[in-house]
Amino acid sequence: MLWMIAVLCKRKKIFKRLFPETHWVAALDGIETYKSREKDDCEHCLSRRVLVDDEYITEYYHRYVVLQMVGVTPAVFLDVEALQPGETEAAAGMRLLERFLKRHPRYLDAITMDAFYLQAPFVKKLLKYGLHLLIVLKQENRELYQDAVGLCASVPVKITKVVTKEIRFWDLGAMQTWTQLEREVRVVRSIEKQLKGKKQKNGEWVYKEETKDWIWCIISPEGGEKPDGELTVKWGHARWDEETRGFFELTQYWHLDHCYRHNATAMLACLMILFMAFTLTTIFFQRNLKGIWRSFTRVALARLLMDDLVLPYEGSFWPAAPT
């Protein structure tokens, strides 16, 4: 059903792009929905050792890998896969992607991921699907990272300014340093400086400059088009959609981190139902509400609906139903 909703959104032109672009991009990332320090009869629980009051204890948790559309609105969830005990996030992510891409091989053009997925076996398996893979490069001890930083001194920098934000980025071109992949990759670096203000109690504003340094590794299909440096930076930042318009909103307002029943099948079913409800609600809010309702946020509208369920009808905000 999640796949069907996503296909209909694309076919009926429901998606609205957040920046001028033609590619369809998705983000792959992990999320933790349950943790407890009490042992339960769940054979699918993952475990880890955590330090509490100078003592290590065992904590049990459930973690999932989620694939979500980014760079567009509504923030549609495409698929979800649970991590099994003893396996990595990359293994679950590969299982999810192979299932989705075999069914919908032309739905996506690019996938953006965190630094954990920068593994040669993982990337090699995905390359056969003809996708652009954009992965954050963080490990400073990797030769690819060190060569990229060193090349910035000899490669021309491009500077763009947006209001209080200055972006300096380098398109370092093809690099052969990642020998395990046995093919060239492109590296793009972006240093972003932004002036942020904070109002003090005395009414004065204090400004502070914030600098962020990002390095992305992009692997494109053989013989295909290669996105330029500016587009690569936009794809890299679009991955935050999964954190802000996806996981954060679901946790804050939709009780994503609540476990209704500690059973692996039930938890996965509840998660997919939640994703479906979130997607359909967002589509309805953006596409169907007219007039005065457009001025309400989804949270305000939900509270009005909730009040009408428990309060007497006299003086209701909603008009009476036609007779």
Image (cartoon, grey):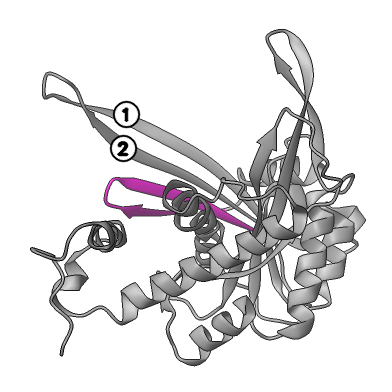
State which quadrant residue 74 falls in.
bottom left
Q: Position of residue 233 (x, y in %)?
A: 53, 59
Query: What residue appears at the point 61 percent right and 43 percent down from the top-left corner?
Result: 153
Report the quarter where the N terminus lies.
Answer: bottom right
Give above or below for 61 relative to 58.
below
In three-dimensional space, the C-alpha distance between marks 2 and 1, rounded to whole angstroms, equals 6 Å
Q: Amino acid at mark 1?
A: Lys
Dot 2 surroundings within 10 Å: few (below 14), some, or many (20 or more)? few
**Residue nearest the observer in this picture, 126 or 10:** 10
Q: Position of residue 317 (x, y in %)?
A: 13, 65
The answer to whether residue 245 shows anywhere in this view is: yes
The residue where tag 2 is placed is 195
Q: Give residue 208's mark.
A: 1
Report the quarter where the C terminus lies.
Answer: bottom left
Q: Amino acid at mark 2?
A: Leu
Q: Left of 307 or right of it: where is 74? A: right
Query: What residue appears at the point 36 percent right and 77 percent down from the top-left corner?
Result: 284
Q: Are marks 2 and 1 in contact (CB under 8 Å)?
A: yes
Q: Position of residue 162 (x, y in %)?
A: 31, 54
State which quadrant residue 176 falls in.
bottom right
Provide the major secondary structure of the magenta segment.
strand
Considering the numbered disc 1 on the image, is that residue within a helix, a strand or a loop? strand
The segment highlighted magenta reads 156-176
Comes first in the chain, label 2 or label 1: 2
Q: Left of 140 or right of it: where is 91? A: right
